Amino acid sequence: MHVEDLLRLESLDLTLLWGGPPLLAREISGVTATDLEDPGRFLQRGEIVLSGLVWWSAADEEGTADRFVAALRDAGAAALLAGEETHGTVPEVLVDACRRHGIALFSVPVHTSFRAITDTVYLRQWGDLSRRPAAAPYALPENVRGELSRLLADGAGPDTLLTRAVDRLGTPPCYVLSATGRTIARTPGARVLSAAEAAGRLKAALRVDPDASPYGQWFLHLPGAVDHLPGAVDVPPRMLHEIAEVFAQYRLGVLRREAAACGAAAELLGLLDLDTRGSWAGSGSDSGPGSGFGSGSRSAPLAAALRACGLPEHGPYTVVAVSLGTAGGDAAEALGEVLRHLAGHRSVTGSLAGGRAAAVIATDSGSPEDVVPALKKLWPTLHACDEAVFPYGGISTTAVTPSELNGALVQARYALTAAERAGNANLTAIEDLTTLDALLAGVPTDVRTAFGIHALGPLADATNPSHRMLLETLDTFLAHNGSWARTAEALHLHVNTVHYRIQRVELLTGRDLARLDHKLDLKAALLCR
């Protein structure tokens, strides 16, 4: 692996501050993390150096940075990767020192950990070495590597691969875990972990494929091997990275198989999405409200799409819709990962327009009522995959028959919109919408705005101080159930003043606040602002 390869890894998000082609072509022999002012005696030639710059302060003279970089040059360091977290940026004096001494310099953003860089370098480096005829000591024996390659080619399961890979170590407890704490593989002696417990162990695990997304990442966890706990199995780092490389290849095979099923998922969701837009509108004799597929020719494409996805042609089903807020990302990958926790429930996931994703879950083999609490319990682990991204989700009620699937997609989308308005990586089920405020949260923003403007009339002009005062009075009056006395007390006004203001509201809006339906109209308009 060469220095320039670091720039090609989008997952690390490094920025080159200084360094020309000759420096970037240097080969990386290893990684050292240090914050010593003079780290020279601890470095090996060809290593990249990770530093949080704790040794430097704004009061330091230029000589401090110069001595540090000179030590790197004398030790033959390949490059310096400086963290931005301590000072918010990489000091210019350090850039100048690297330029003088011929050391390539990269900045490491706050969201990229030094451990992620270390894992990336060693995984790629030792993965390359494991394929060389003359691999150095402590790598997996040649016969084991050959056997693992054959097992991969024969389609062996992940438990078999993991058990055989660590057999030379006495088959200690070992796991391959997903980013949300799902156990992908474990050795026979490894106890079962809950998703929450497994997710808590990811910090002491090795990434299988550093280039994978936060939701598609897998981790190799041999308790104590990465964080060197007392009594842990002593495993050469190269061996861990070679095992990780095996599962990186296995993961690619899984992704290829899933990609082959994407077309069927897209067709199914396309049919449902088409119907929600009214393109399947019709008046079949047994088509109820919202059941555009009805019977006959309109139900045939849906049945075929369900079969192609491996889903039953009968219900019940639940539909889930997901977005990742404004951060983008692969919502379908995130949703697919969390749904893999629902053992016993078949599902299919695909992308929708606008960066959203949806899934149809067949709940014929379990209780449909179990899906909502299970997803709500798992949702925090999805957010923990990337704390900079806020995943939002909406869950439909149970669709008893295929003809109700299009209505279920409408419900899931509506609940998703409500979740996005609530914020905080929220997951909302249709059954959660039990108040007027919650119900209105799912209404599209442009519709809410239009309703508020037309219902409030001139009062919708918030730039008018008089209108703002009347809106405050109206809001307080409705919040106190139309009580003149309590409204006057809350606003510190005379009751006659409240009467006058409410009369003005009625005049400007054309509503009669003695009527319940008019009160509800104006309450909804206030909530839609």
Image (tube, grey):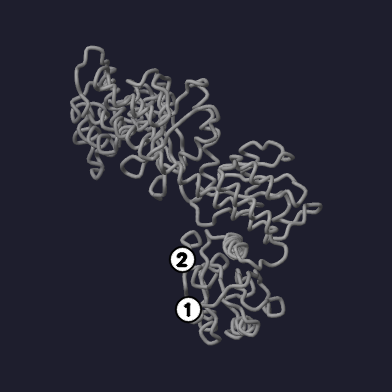
Q: Residue 52's mark?
A: none
Q: Residue at x 69, y 67 (%)?
A: 136
Q: Which residue is most to the right?
A: 231
Q: Nearer the viewer, residue 206 or 462?
A: 206
Q: Is residue 164 above or below residue 453?
A: below
**Amino acid bearing label 2:** Arg
Q: Residue 18's mark?
A: 1
Q: Quadrant of the C terminus?
A: top left
Disc 2/disc 1 C-alpha distance (Å): 16 Å
Residue 284 falls in image quadrant: top left
Give the residue number, with chain letter if any, for mark 2.
8
In x, y percent, where is residue 237? 69, 60
- Mark 2 or 1, closer to the camera: 2
In x, y percent, where is residue 230? 80, 54
Q: Is residue 180 above or below residue 288?
A: below
Residue 421 falls in image quadrant: top left
Left/right placement of residue 33 relative to residue 343 reads right
In x, y percent, where is residue 462? 26, 42
Q: Nearer the viewer, residue 56 or 163?
A: 163
In x, y percent, where is residue 388? 48, 51
Q: Is residue 4 visible?
A: yes
Q: Is residue 437 visible?
A: no
Q: Nearer the viewer, residue 225 or 526?
A: 225
Q: Residue at x 54, y 46 (%)?
A: 384
Q: Which secondary structure lies at badge 1?
A: strand
